[in-house]
Image: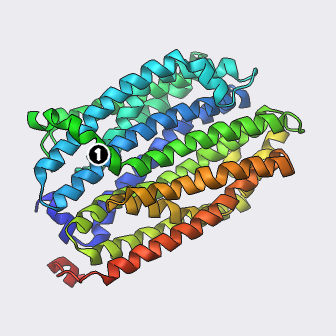
Amino acid sequence: MEQSKLLGTERINKLLLFFSVPSVISLVLNAIYNMVDQIFIGQGVGYLGNGATNVIFPLIQFAVAIGLLLGDGAANYMNLHLGMGEKEQANRGTAAGLAGVALVGIALTILFNLFLEPLCWLFGATQATLPYAIDYGRIISLGIFFCTFDSCAMSMIRADGSPRFAMMGLVAGCIVNLIGDPLTIFVFGMGVKGAALATILGQLVNMALYLWYFFIRGCRTVSLDRDAFVHAPSYMPRVAKLGISSFVTQFAVVIVIAIQNNVLVAYGASSKYGAEIPMTALGVTMKVFTVLQCAVTGLCSGAQPIFSFNYGSAQYNRVRETLKKVLLLSLAIMAVATVWFQLAPMSIIQIFGSADPLYNEFSVKCLRIFLALLVLDAFQMVGSSFLQSIGKPAPAAVLVIFRQLILLIPATFLFAYLFGVEGVLYSGPFAGLLVGLASAFLLLREWKQLGQSAPQPQSAQDRDA
């Protein structure tokens, strides 16, 4: 049966396994991909090297944000229009995503290399971490095009009905990075430069596989013909509109990291921990959080084609069933992680190197305090992804803005002023509590609206389930 038709007829459990498992593996690998450098640098260079990777991390996150703006947007546009039987529109939306990311990727590569040092200062570099940040960031900036393209293409390939191939591309890149890091850092003695080189080589391999998929192997549900690319420029705004929530989610992280790094450096300098330890420790915590976020986001991303197609074809009963299962699984993932962080935080910290007792002490506080209400973040992640999938990007973006910009940033300044450098850590559970409640309310409202819609005829598979 045609792939797009299966989205509207196959059992939800089977669809989630097909789409979400590769998606979860892909995104978690992507997060680990970015974290591997920090692990090997922590063991081979020390926490100052890790502090430098935290300085450069916002640049990588911004590139990912641009990639997801176009990639998730094109994926949602593709499946919404396939669900409505409008294949030509889906073709043009897909081409718009690819053309857009090529242009933006080139622009980012130029800009990051021109303004690397001022960007390092902006994102919290200190005199001690700046040399490492420049060495690491210069090479990462040269490969930022690969990172941007990979983030975009992964979403589109997954939505095209090939989640396993999307996963394979990341696996290949991750293997290159995993082999390259110990070789360049420990064998060749290249330090942070070697870690950066291994990273961009892995991204290059990933990009090569994705290009082969689009232009040699060929897509499964859309056609990237000449007509699609001729009309691509006029479709870029439509595609970007459906990816705005993903962009805002990632870009908000860039802003938050920049502010928190600078606040931690300023207040840490007058504490027993010093300027570098708090920034490095919270940076590691954010990388761990990113892995969990990617697990939930992968689950949601895998469900996006199911949401979009069935919403577009007005099969609201299937939309509700998918939403229920995705939310319950997401809550379970976050609950297990929360228990782990509270009971055994050092099992995580030791992975990144833990020679300094003060570094260990602050890192334990980061995991236990900053991620204390992690489980409530599941409501926001699922809510934003779901709303974006059904063509409601505005409320999806509002949830992200509410958490990161309206709650987390003011709380960072306020709690730091009241309680010093450790006060920054309490901004996490504060923002998580309020946005979790707001997201749960929006999801409940959408759930009720879907239930009030006229019931749709079930497929044979649904009746047999």
Q: Quadrant of the C terminus?
A: bottom left
Dividing the picture into quadrants, the one containing residue 206 is top left
Left or right position of 68 against 85: right
Residue 53, given in percent of the width and then of the height, sits at 61, 30
Left or right position of 61 against 335: left
Up-down: is 59 above or below 138?
A: below
Up-down: is 434 above or below 358?
A: below
Rate crowding at label 1 as few (under 14), some (14 to 19) or many (20 or more) other CA atoms within 10 Å: many
Left or right position of 46 against 53: right
Left or right position of 72 against 284: left
The residue sitting at 38% across, 38% down in the picture is: 67
The residue sitting at 51% across, 73% down in the picture is: 441
Residue 211, given in percent of the width and then of the height, sits at 25, 32
The residue sitting at 59% across, 44% down in the picture is: 287
Q: Specify the color scheme.
A: rainbow
Residue 376, given in percent of the width and then of the height, sits at 59, 66
Q: Quadrant of the N terminus?
A: bottom left
Q: Is residue 356 visible?
A: no
Q: Nearer the viewer, residue 117 or 410?
A: 410
Q: Is residue 32 visible?
A: yes
Dividing the picture into quadrants, the one containing residue 436 is bottom right
Amino acid under disc 1: Val
Determine which residue is flagged by label 1: 239
Residue 349, given in percent of the width and then of the height, sits at 70, 45
